[in-house]
Amino acid sequence: MSAPPPTPIKPTSGNRPFIAVSTKIYFSYARTTSFTASVLSLLTSNLPSLNIDVLLIPDFVSLVPTIATIAAAAAPNPIINKILAVGAQNCAAHGSGPFTGEVSAAVLSEIGCAVVEVGHAERRRLFGEADDAVVRDKVAAVVRNGMVPLVCVGEETAMMECGRVEGERGVVAVAGVEGAAREVVRQVEAALESVDGEKEVVLAYEPVWAIGAAEPAGAEYVMGVVKRVRESEVVRSRKGTTRIVYGGAAGPGLWERLGGEVDGLFLGRFGHDPDQFVRMIYEVAGVSMER
């Protein structure tokens, strides 16, 4: 059976909002199947009103059936393919060869993945991928195979001790924001070193200290870092679509607090309930959910 063609994440008009959920390895195969079916069922009633890119990132084993399920749902309802896509949680830096246990970007593209996540903090910390060159080579492999890299970047520790001033929306650690932004920009520069500036990328700003925490990083802190990253030369000089999303204990209500400074959200456990995930899709899309 031939694989469905990839459905690249491409905004229909400008940088439309983006929301993604990764199941990591929390889900069983059966739960992934059920989750995908539930999301499709909940979304289908109001699809025409949604101007958003939605990305599901299951485990490797579940990629093909998830892509097939979405393709089957899109056959009578083609608008699904304009909204919903599937991504992978990782890929090999190598194109092919004797690399046991790895999955190549070429194979991910062949089966219909649109996006590949690269450089997540857990990969950097637990699997020895802290080397900027590893992330750079993986990003290059993703782009080379016609997919969009979802590049995870973020500072290791909260930089709140450097100085605090009163801002319009409350106290902001300005000096801390500057330090975090410098580290994030450095990571972005390294990751995109080999990528054509006209290619599309998604940057996921995930403060490492916020991943798995009870609460996300403060809204002012996030907006300050993202604003500086967006104004950096590495991002400003790009002609390709470059969206910056926030991840790290991202959950309901955060989108509104971020005041439009980010282009979307990257969810982990707070998106693992299909009802809550779909509610957040509508929240980010700015559409009332009709049930």
Image (spheres, rainbow, N blue to C red):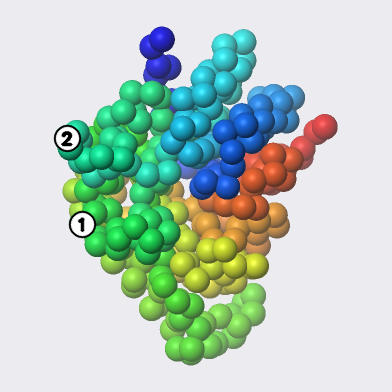
> Percent position (x, y) of residue 280?
67, 46
**Occupied quadrant, residue 17:** top right
Picture residue at 52% right of the left edge, 57% below the top: 246
Horizontal and vertical percent position of residue 216:
60, 66
Per the image, the residue denoted by label 1 is 133
Residue at 50 percent of width and 71 percent of height: 209
Q: Nearer the viewer, residue 165 or 20?
A: 20
The residue lying toward the viewer, choosing from 207 and 268, is 268
Could you tell whether 83 is left or right of 238 in the image? Answer: right
**Which residue lies most toward the front here?**
100
Q: Dividing the picture into quarters, in which one does residue 166 lie?
A: bottom right
Quarter of the C terminus within the rendering: top right
Judged from the image, the secondary structure of the residue bearing numbered disc 2 is loop
Residue 191, relative to residue 290: is it above or below?
Answer: below
What quarter of the picture does the N terminus occupy? top left
Q: Is residue 188 visible?
A: no
Give the structural element (helix, strand or loop) at label 1.
Answer: helix
Which dot, 1 or 2, sits closer to the camera? 2
Upstream in the sequence, badge 1 or badge 2?
2
Q: How far apart are the alpha carbons under marks 1 and 2?
A: 19 Å
Q: Which mark identifies residue 239? A: none
Amino acid beneath label 1: Ala
Q: Position of residue 132 (x, y in %)?
A: 24, 60
Give the residue at mark 2.
97
Circle 1 Cα neighbour tier, 10 Å, few/some/many (<14 / 14–19 / ≥20): some
Q: Amino acid at mark 2?
A: Gly
Measuring from the top left, give residue 135's x and y in whole percent: 28, 53
